[in-house]
Image: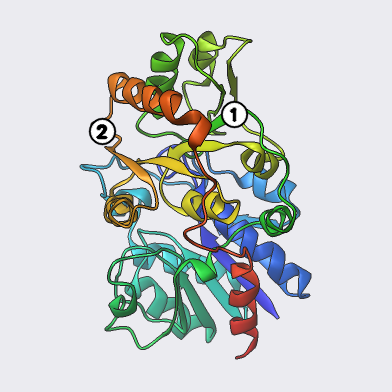
Amino acid sequence: MKVVFRVDASSLIGSGHVMRCLVLAEVLQSHDWKVQFVCLPQGGDLVAFIEKNGFIVKQLSPPHIFMQPRFDGDYESWLHRSESEDAKEFVDIVGVTDWVVVDHYALGSQWERLVREKLDCRLLVIDDLNRSHDCELILDQNLWPDLQSRYGSSPARKLLGPQYALLRPRFRKLKSSLPEKENQVIAFFGGADPTQECEKLLEAASKMSNLPFNLKVVAGRLNPKYEKLLQYVKPERIEVIQYSYDFELELAKSKYAIGASGVSNWERFCLKIPATIVSVADNQRVLSQFLSTQKLVTYLGVGQETTSEIYRKELSRLKQAWDSIPIFNQLDIDGAGAERVVNTMESY
């Protein structure tokens, strides 16, 4: 079986869509599927990273005009072209395939319909936005308050909730044998950190004394302020790295986490890590608020409104409660979501 992923990354989009598609791609490949990616070349596109992970990447024509978002959640600007133009070139590049997996907020039912008609293939859509789709399968791995009624107008089969979370196999292995905890708080706000949470957190931490834990900040592969963030390093208690080749282990060893909402929620929950979260994108707000009302996380609000003072207060709270912070046990995320998705695809 052949499957082609249509997904993008950039300094604007971030890396999350590509990273979760890579998880699914690796499981499909382990099931002897032939896997390819199709991406739009742009700054921070992660094409080389996908290729480094062993997958063929075919690139669309570079945009003639790079569109800037008019507001938070202006997903149409991510594409720099129309859906029909993207679909036509995608079809020409792909030629023949059994399945297409599309993970892109700027591509919707129009694109899906055109691709299905031309390629006569099955379609899996990975989405978080509760939109109408023209496909066989919809995957939304989040825990929404309206989970069972989402995508109601779509005839597709729906794979909904964290049991389908696309987590790397390392998470499942670590969950079965968790390492000993270190005196560490780990912070990660996504590959691009669009609302500059790392700097706010580090500014707050650098002014505090006698923190009872070490703070490790993972800036992200696409973070434009990485060099500036290094000025906050204090060898005895603050460390800043761009990324970790074994992020899963670093997370598993940590007693607490601070970071963005989204798929990172399920990674932390899988490893039983309690967390403080921030919404760094428009589509994370409802999810974050719901997790907060369920007392599954501490929620600081939206990134456009957080400040170093907010982080100072949160660090002070952690400082006072540090010796009594329990592991996270409210949800059981087993890390087998990608296998469940692939088994469903193969059932066709």
Of labels 2 and 1, earlier in sequence is 1
Q: Secondary structure at mark 1?
A: strand
Q: Answer left or right for 37 relative to 176.
A: left
Above or below, 205 relative to 76? above
Dot 2 amino acid type: Gln
| Quadrant of res 239 | top right
Which residue, given by chain and number where applicable, does mark 2 sit on? 304
- On the image, the x and y values in percent for residue 300 come to 30, 37
Q: Answer left or right for 74 relative to 142.
A: left
Above or below, 72 relative to 151? above
Viewer-nearest residue: 187 or 60: 187
Which residue, given by chain and number where applicable, does mark 1 sit on? 184
Disc 2 vs disc 1: Cβ atoms closer than 8 Å? Answer: no
Q: Nearer the viewer, mark 2 or mark 1?
A: 1
Q: Answer left or right for 311 relative to 343.
A: left
| Quadrant of res 30 | bottom right
| Residue at 43% from the left image edge and 33% from the top image edge | 193
- On the image, the x and y values in percent for residue 246 come to 71, 40
| Residue at 50% from the left image edge and 47% from the top image edge | 9
- Rendered-image quadrant of the C terminus: bottom right
- Rendered-image quadrant of the N terminus: bottom right
Label 2 environment density (alpha carbons within 10 Å; few <14, some 14–19, many ≥20): some
Dot 1 amino acid type: Gln
Residue positioned most to the bottom = 348
Above or below, 228 relative to 195? above
- On the image, the x and y values in percent for residue 313 come to 32, 23
Q: Secondary structure at mark 2?
A: loop
| Residue at 50% from the left image edge and 75% from the top image edge | 124
Viewer-nearest residue: 286 or 110: 286
- Disc assigned to residue 271: none
